[in-house]
Image (cartoon, grey):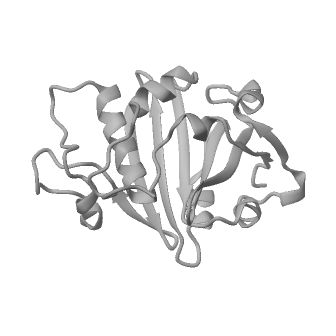
């Protein structure tokens, strides 16, 4: 369990871990506040039995930047939370909405090298609530003020790079969900799904 989660910091830079695992040019991940991976699969429109249990290296054999097919790696993240790492394709808004139905919270972080410096978005109960970002000064304005307690010490400034900024977004996710991305996270076995296009 994370000590003082609203002030905790990861043992390793979140950005360095993503880069070290080949995700520095394109990264997209959702965190959903449920531990039921089968329910996540159903909400994505796939039969839970159609998934393939595999490790990160196997999942990354399908890694592409922006192709047509949506492939996701789904599994446990922390107590009460699961992750959906997009391996290929783009997670469409209607699926984010479906994942957040029935009072679920969905955090969505993405980064596209040179095209988008990264964002952290929040959807709750089918409603997009805004962008989560640390303020530019302690106690400063936040679009989603309910996460203010998780922003301590992560203030943003124009002096830091896009990578450092995104690292702070990832620290916010870790504080909210109770777990940062770490080496054990990448060493986990999760389920790979090919998500069909909506007709």
Out of 44 and 190, give the one closest to the viewer.
190
Q: Quadrant of residue 33?
A: bottom right
Left or right of 31 in this view: 5: left
Q: Position of residue 25 (x, y in %)?
A: 50, 22
Across and down, in percent, residue 73 comes to 70, 43
For residue 144, what is the image quadrant? bottom left
The relative height of residue 194 versus residue 15 in the rendered view (above or below) is: below
Residue 43: % across, % down:
71, 64
Numbered circles on residues, count? 0
Q: Residue at x 35, y 56 (%)?
A: 3
**Which residue corresponds to the image point at 84% horizontal and 49% vertical from the top-left?**
51
Residue shown at the point (41%, 31%) measured from the top left: 12
Q: Is residue 89 visible?
A: no
153 vs 35: above or below: above
Determine the image quadrant of residue 9.
top left
Residue at the spot 56% in from the left edge and 67% down from the top edge: 100
Residue 150, relative to residue 10: is it above or below? below
Q: Does residue 22 show up? A: yes
- Residue 50 appears at what percent x and percent y? 89, 52
Closest to the observer: 77 or 116? Answer: 77
Frontmost residue, 81 versus 41: 81
Q: Residue furthest bottom?
A: 102
Kindly give the residue lying farthest to the right in the view shown: 49
Q: Is 14 on the left or on the right of 94, as rendered?
A: left
Q: Quadrant of the C terminus?
A: bottom right
């Amino acid at each position: 369990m994370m000590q003082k989660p609203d002030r905790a910091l990861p043992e390793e830079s979140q950005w360095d871990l993503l880069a070290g695992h080949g995700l520095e040019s394109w990264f997209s991940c959702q965190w959903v506040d449920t531990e039921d991976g089968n329910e996540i699969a159903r909400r994505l429109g796939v039969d839970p039995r159609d998934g393939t249990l595999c490790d990160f290296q196997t999942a990354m054999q399908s890694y592409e930047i922006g192709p047509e097919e949506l492939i996701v790696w789904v599994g446990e993240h922390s107590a009460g939370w699961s992750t959906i790492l997009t391996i290929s394709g783009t997670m469409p808004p209607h699926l984010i909405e479906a994942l957040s139905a029935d009072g679920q919270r969905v955090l969505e972080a993405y980064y596209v090298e040179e095209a988008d410096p990264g964002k952290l978005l929040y959807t709750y109960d089918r409603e997009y609530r805004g962008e989560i970002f640390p303020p530019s000064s302690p106690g400063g304005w936040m679009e989603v003020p309910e996460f203010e307690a998780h922003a301590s010490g992560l203030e943003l400034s124009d002096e830091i790079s896009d990578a450092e900024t995104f690292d702070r977004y990832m620290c916010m996710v870790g504080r909210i969900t109770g777990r940062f991305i770490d080496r054990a996270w990448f060493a986990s076995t999760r389920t790979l799904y090919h998500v069909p296009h909506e007709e």
